[in-house]
Amino acid sequence: MKYNEMIGFGVAGNFAGHLEQANEAADFKKIEVSDEIQPKAIFPFYLPNLSESFLSVFPLASTQLKMPETSYDVQIEPEVAIICDIHYSGDEVESITPKLFGAYNDCSIRRPDAKKISEKKNWGEKSKGISKDLIEIDSFSEGGILDHFKIASFHIKDNSVHMYGEDSDVLSYSYFHGKLLDWIVEKMNLQQDVGPAENINEYLLKCNKPTECIISIGATRYTEYGEHNFLSVGDTSVVVVYDKRVYSFSEISKKVQARDFTGEDLSFLVQEVI
């Protein structure tokens, strides 16, 4: 899987309560939405072959997470990522087709001075994470495989395991299935450079219309611990997407406690913080 050839986007505000916990809700007050649960924007985190942008640096890693050279707080953002084919009609995106999914860490700097979402998302190599264990999507619609999955995350610090994000059903996303895909396509074509948002169609054209993309579809809510604790060198970040028909949350927690990051019907992302 050649991730470095795929354009990378994230969805902001697709899980109720997360933006408030991250102190980012006010950033989106200029963004118009058609209903109160609608996500706020999509943002770029990786723009292949666009050398004039800091987003041209490939940020994804599967085993390590590199801290920025600043004193800003850094948090795990546990998410599901989907790998999609992009279909064009002329210079506009006609549709996207999800084909794989897995655990993702949309790791973020808490920068109150950032003007764009992307300024918090890519500070160089190994600043984000995607699991090596991806799962095939049969159908990104009601009744498909993703309907049976949950997202959990943990922070291992000084050899102690802490629950970082709430154990959340993938179906808890505000927009999902075809509604999410239609919204993403609309934003790829029509989103403007307003507030923290950016013109996505312009980036797609500058990157020569990539035919594949990685999309992280939104961060879950934090636990009380996760909201107030941040990453440090020597910690370990763990995000897992697992089939709730096969595993209970208790079983997933026991696997993390035992440092057993293997198994069928799940996708683990385990990153040592360096």
Image (cartoon, grey):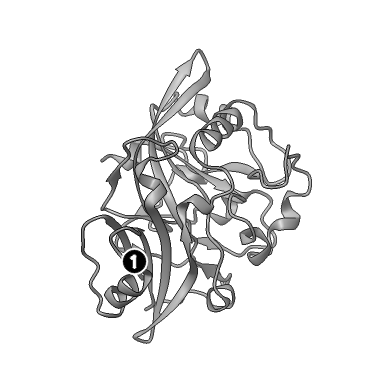
Decide if residue 110 is on the left or right side of residue 159: right
In the image, 210 versus 183, the foreground residue is 183
Residue 232, placed above or below residue 8: below
Crowd tier of the residue under label 1, counting other residues whose Cα lies within 10 Å: few below 14, some 14–19, many 20 or above: many
Image quarter where the N terminus lies is: top left
Residue at horizontal 21 percent and vertical 62 percent from the top: 263
Residue at horizontal 35 percent and vertical 75 percent from the top: 250
Residue at disc 1, secondary structure: strand
Residue 254, image x, y percentages: 30, 77
Residue 166, image x, y percentages: 50, 68
Farthest right residue? 30
Q: Quadrant of residue 249?
A: bottom left
Q: Quadrant of residue 129?
A: bottom left
Residue 53 visible (yes or no): yes
Residue 58 visible (yes or no): no
Residue 109, placed above or below residue 178: below
Residue 17, placed above or below residue 229: above
Residue at horizontal 41 percent and vertical 72 percent from the top: 154
In the image, 174 versus 98, the foreground residue is 174
In the image, 200 versus 114, the foreground residue is 200
Decide if residue 86 is on the left or right side of residue 22: left
Image quarter where the C terminus lies is: bottom left
**Amino acid residing under circle 1:** Gln
Decide if residue 208 is on the left or right side of residue 71: left
Residue tagged 1: 271
Residue at horizontal 63 percent and vertical 33 percent from the top: 199
Residue 267, image x, y percentages: 30, 56
Residue 115, placed above or below residue 232: above
Residue 152, image x, y percentages: 42, 65
